[in-house]
Amino acid sequence: MELELLTTTLARALAFGTPLLLAALGEVVAERAGVVNLGMEGMMMLGAVAGFMVAAATGSLPLALLASTLAGVAVAALHGVIATFLLANQFVSGLAITIGGVGLANLLGKEWVGKPLAAPMLPFDVPVLSGVPLLGPAFFTRQYALTYAALVLALVVWLVLFRSRVGLTLRTVGESPAAADAAGANVRRVRFLAVLVGGAMAGLAGAYLSLAYRPAWGENITNGMGWIALGLTILALWHPLRAVPAALLFGAFFTLSFRLQAVLPPELLTLLPYLVTVLALTLIAWRGGRGAVGAPEALGVPYRRGERE
């Protein structure tokens, strides 16, 4: 019984954690370049509604995924222009995009509320690996393609950020844009492109919800996941590989909040990941300050060429 509970919890944690991981990876890329993106919730919502509408109209999942990605990129481009070229307040821009994006998505999807998707993305078992004891039922049985894509993307983002010249430039832009500028990097362009990547991943996260996890449109389908992804980014200390266990942690507590209602208040289990995040950051900051926490030094700071940092 205990083993079954463990495998089921891990499997559901991975399923629920997939959109969180995708959105968090996008946020990691954007924030490593120095741009705070509080518009994740709005981007996920618009990605979700775009994917659902295209899938319902055409029956094509590839086209639906493309629509979701492009929707996320389009909204991210707006935030990128405002934050990197117009040098406006990144926090205000992100909040406005979230509020506007959620409202627009609900408006566009109004006629689809309660309607299931005729041809949703289906889960599948991974040959051979699904038969491995414990790990097979937990991670390789009845999962979605986007789940494995998210795990691969975590590795790809890590390789790009920490094992490539492109990643070095991006991280330098987030840490010391003046130094990156002096070395020949176009700071605004790098930041803009990083925000676009974040928007693409947010769009995919929304697509996962409306095409796979909950293949029926409903208002506020993301249910605050964009905000959870922001907390997950901090918990992972802006590191793509650490985002994987962090997403599983959030997913596990969410799953347990339903399974252990008779033992503990579900609100407490839902709150625990946030308490862990706050506690971890408090301890790390107490030991070493901002640099130890891992936040890029120029995070949230507009870059004006010629100004001293």
Image (tube, rainbow, N blue to C red):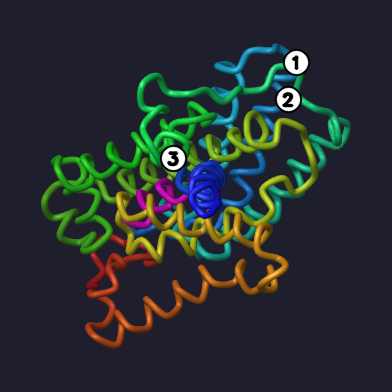
How much space separates mark 1 and mark 3, taking CA atoms?
Answer: 26 Å
Report the amino acid beneath label 2.
Answer: Met
Of pointers 2 and 3, the one earlier in the residue sequence: 2
The residue drawn where x is 46% and y is 43% is 22
Circles 2 and 1 in contact, beta carbons < 8 Å: yes
Viewed as shown, does residue 104 lie left or right of 31? right
List x then y, in percent, for residue 132: 36, 32
List x then y, in percent, for residue 166: 19, 40
Report the amino acid beneath label 3.
Answer: Leu
Q: In which quarter of the image is residue 43?
A: top right
Picture layout, residue 191 above or below residue 56: below
As drawn, the label of residue 196 is: 3
To which residue does mark 1 refer? Answer: 57
The residue drawn where x is 65% and y is 64% is 260
The magenta stretch is 23-33
Locate the C terminus by quadrant. bottom left
The residue drawn where x is 63% and y is 74% is 268
How much space separates mark 2 and mark 1, taking CA atoms?
Answer: 6 Å
Which one is nearer the viewer's eye here, 185 or 34? 34
Q: Quadrant of residue 212?
A: top right
As drawn, the label of residue 53 is: 2
The residue drawn where x is 80% and y is 35% is 109
What secondary structure is marked by label 1? helix
Q: Residue furthest front?
A: 1
Asked if residue 48 is among those painted magenta in the image, a careful observer would answer no
Is residue 302 visible in the rendered image? The answer is yes
List x then y, in percent, for residue 28: 37, 53
Report the amino acid beneath label 1.
Answer: Ala
Asked if residue 27 is among those painted magenta in the image, a careful observer would answer yes
Report crowding for label 1: few under 14, some 14 to 19, many 20 or more residues within 10 A (C-alpha). few
Picture layout, residue 8 above or below residue 121: below
- Dot in front, 1 or 3: 1
